[in-house]
Image: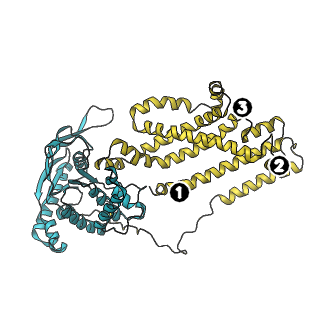
Amino acid sequence: MSVLSLQSVSLAFPADRDSRETRLVLDGVTLHLASDEFIAVIGRSGSGKTSLLNLAAGFLKPTSGRVSVDGADITGPAADRAVVFQDDALYPWLNARDNVAFPLKLRGIAKGERRLRADELLAKVGLENAGSKNIWELSGGMRQRVGIARALASEPRFLLLDEPLGALDALTRTRLQQFLLKVWSESKTGALLITHSIEEAMLLATRVVVLAPNPGRIIADIPASFGRQLLGGKSLQDIKDSPEYRRLHDGLTGLIHADSEEEAA
Amino acid sequence: MTINIGSIAPVAPAAPAVTEAQRPKRSPGTLPVSLATIIAIIAAWSLASAYGLVSPLFLPSPLIVLKAIYSVAVNGFVDSTLAQHTLASLLRIFAALAAALVIGIPAGLAIGTSRIGKGILDPIVEFLRPLPPLAYLPLIIIWIGIGEASKITVIALAMLPPIILSTAAGVKSAPADFINAARSFGATRLQILVQVILPSAIPSILTGTRIALGAGWSTLVAAELVAASRGLGFMIQSAAQFLVTDIVIAGIIVIAVIAFLFEILARLLERWFVPWAAHR
């Protein structure tokens, strides 16, 4: 069991160019992600959700505080924390298979073996026939599945998901949510999902973390079990109709909404 | 439901089935107008020669120019046939292009990826870029003589700035997510450079190569002015000295046709090498 930890992490950006003043983006955020957990982070725009993920990935360094994996401070991005991006970030000069095989190529794995493992992963995400397709021939949902397969190819301990479903249409999004849940439950990696959608957070995560803006800070960290129910075979409609689902949904909506009223006042 | 309104747009199918009847009619574009312009110019040229408006010494008729092209192709001019002149010029252009690519792409990568690289190379490129090749041609001849090397060097120097600058621009256009993705899979700096940044820059490098070929042709004629015994530029220069205007115009037309073919070749290469550039 591995743990990705952010301890009292703060992040400040220069307020504008040529200025010495700084703007606090995240203030004293502490979050521990175990490799069997699925944490969803929700919050309004400007609450520092994506900065939180960029810190965990190692793309950004905290202004103060520590980011560590199993107690060792991270020094930057590494293969144990693979990222899936909102704009898929697939390489258009590679076909779907070679995109999935890209992390394996970086590790110097031989071509035949790369191909084999990439095809396995493509099959796992339901794209066994799309290996030699060009990226621009794939729909948005298929692209994100390739992106997830590529991240899994690097055999990470943690999957960092930066609103991967944010740009998809509603139907595809619902399908991919359940797909993501299944992939996570089979892969034994920790997942950190950044999302705008309360529903998505509740249905996928084992813990829902709410960030409030200005500066970004954690105002709630609530366990959720709807994903497990969904995996256990309970229907999406039954889950959404259950009183506990509604209670949590109202609670989370209230938390985010209350915060925006406070700001409007 | 908390799905935002903006995300409910339907996803376009991967391969939209459009029947022939549904396909929007392609507009004829500028091609008919361009063809008419060319025909008009040639007609005006023929009329001017036929009615003796311009002395044949200055402007021989299109027919005479065609005959000149045929005569140079078969009998040659100043000891070489048209094919030999053309081959000599093409070899210089391609040797210079190879040298410019081998030096220019790494230099452009250095400018685009490293502060120190940019600091070192920027002043050199900015010094070279606005200089007309004719200005430094005499110096190159003093340094490396009047042989083939000096001609290729001058053409390569003229080709370098567009290749360096387009490579550097291509590097900067590599999306941050492409680089971050590779980093999160544990890529080293060299792996990112070779496997992410360089492929991202290829469309821009190809555009730079097209511009460089244009610069190369203009420099070629100048470079062949000096002590060449073959080449299209040399052919034009020798013909001009003897006032053989039909061969001068023939040479110009051959260069124009080759440059046009290069342009088509470059576009085909683009479509073949980087089909994805059209989908970015």
Front position in the image: A72 or A241: A72
- Residue A246 % position (x, y): 13, 67
Q: Residue at x 40, y 38 (%)?
A: B113
Q: Give the colour in which the image draws chain A.
A: cyan
Judging by the rendered image, the residue that carries numbered circle 2 is B71
Q: Nearer the viewer, mark 2 or mark 1?
A: 2
- Give the Cα distance between marks 3 and 2: 25 Å
- Mark 2–mark 1 Cα distance, whole angstroms, equals 38 Å
Residue B252 sits in quarter: top right
Co-location on one chain, circles 2 and 1: yes
Display colour for chain B: yellow
Q: Are marks 1 and 3 on the same chain?
A: yes
Which chain is indicated by disc 1?
A: B
Q: Is residue A160 left or right of residue B122?
A: left
Q: Which residue does the image show at 42% across and 33% down from the upper left? A: B117
Check the image and report above or below for A177 versus B166: below
Name the amino acid, label 1: Arg
Q: Position of residue B189 (x, y in %)?
A: 34, 41
Q: Which residue is mark 3?
A: B226
Pinpoint residue A188: horizontal percent, then vertical percent.
Answer: 18, 59
Q: SS at mark 1?
A: helix
Q: Residues within 10 Å of mark 2 (few under 14, many from 20)?
A: some
Mark 2 chain = B
Chosen colour scheme = by chain
Observer able to see residue A144: no
Q: Relative to A17, say whether A106 is above or below.
A: below
Distance (Cα) linking label 1 and label 3: 38 Å
Mark 3 burial class by Cα count in 10 Å: few <14, some 14-19, many 20+: some
Q: Secondary structure beneath disc 3?
A: loop
